[in-house]
Image (tube, grey):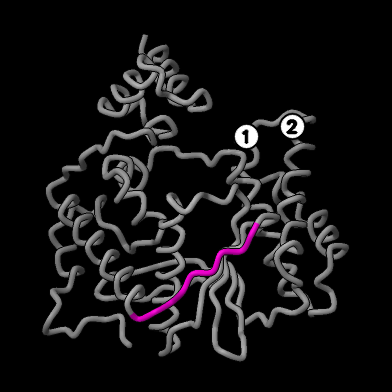
Amino acid sequence: MTVTEPAEKAESATDKLMDIPERYMPKYLSPSSASSYRECARRWKFRYVDKLPDPPGEPAVTGTFAHMVLEKLMQEPVENRTPARAKELAREMWPKMENSRDYQGLDLDKEASLKFRWNGWKAIEGLWDLEDPRDVRVASTEQDVRVEINGVPFRGIIDRVDETDEGLVVTDYKSGKAPSARFSSNYATQMLLYAAALTELEGHKPVKAQLLYLGQKAVEVEITDDNLAEAVDELRTTWLAIIESCISQEFEASPSPLCGWCPFVAQCPEGTAEVLHRDKIGKLRSDAPALERIAQAEKADD
């Protein structure tokens, strides 16, 4: 199988980049940026073109810490991949985490900081609920893949690639709550795109992908020629749509319940209207931060 169309059958999406003002020109597409555009082109523009501040929340920073420790753990000799060694690594790496911009941006007090460290450790410890790290044959960790897939410049960072007797396995850690099947398609597409990138680099596709929801469950993603081609086609369609938006400089908003969590809602009239309407009819979740963001923006304008 190949995931690249023959040149005579596919217009190179990259050719259109010449028509895009430099500040709009995307250098590559990642699984997260592709998903962001499909959810809302306006939000994509705010983040990737206007580069408005989009600081990660506490769950995301907790996940970053867990990833840091697990990356180092899986680089250890197999006999050292124990919970005791993971604790040592967590202590060693804590100063780096504590001094990072993302962590500092959380502005946690002493009690909240202790809770953060505990949640980070529980995520790390959760790996042993799913596998024995000593049994894993690691091919790479945090592999930065940059490759053209079907005319699309792609970049992704793969948490772990494992070697098995059957072939390569793409592995990704997730520290948040495992989603229901209804909301898991984006993660499956992400894993398929990682598999497509490795297929381009290695010349053959991985045998499977797996999502490790730390402390919860492992979810396997089947890799077939059909679903790999479907994910690649979706990536190309998204890339072409982004290019058209960048040329026209029109990025439509897609109001939805997700507006309640959008960090840019106060800059988006459609998003603001959606949030206020949902609040009025009692359909806005109590933990959605959008109302506070809108109120802060209105206060700053006064």
Q: Residue 6 vs residue 142: left or right?
A: left
Label 1, label 2: how many angstroms apart (C-alpha)?
Answer: 10 Å
Q: Do residues under tags 1 and 2 come within 8 Å of each other at their CB atoms? A: yes
| Sequence-wise first label, 1 or 2 | 1
- Residue ID for mark 1: 106
Image quadrant holding the C terminus, namely top left
The magenta segment: 217-225
Answer with the quarter of the image where residue 172 lies.
bottom right
Residue 220 inside the magenta-drawn segment: yes
Instruction: State which quadrant residue 119 falls in.
Output: top right
User: 157 above or below 264?
Assistant: below
Mark 1 element type: helix
Tag 2 residue: 112
Which image quarter: residue 3? bottom left
The three-letter code of the residue at mark 1 reads Leu
Dot in front, 1 or 2: 2
Is residue 190 depicted above or below 180 in this figure? below
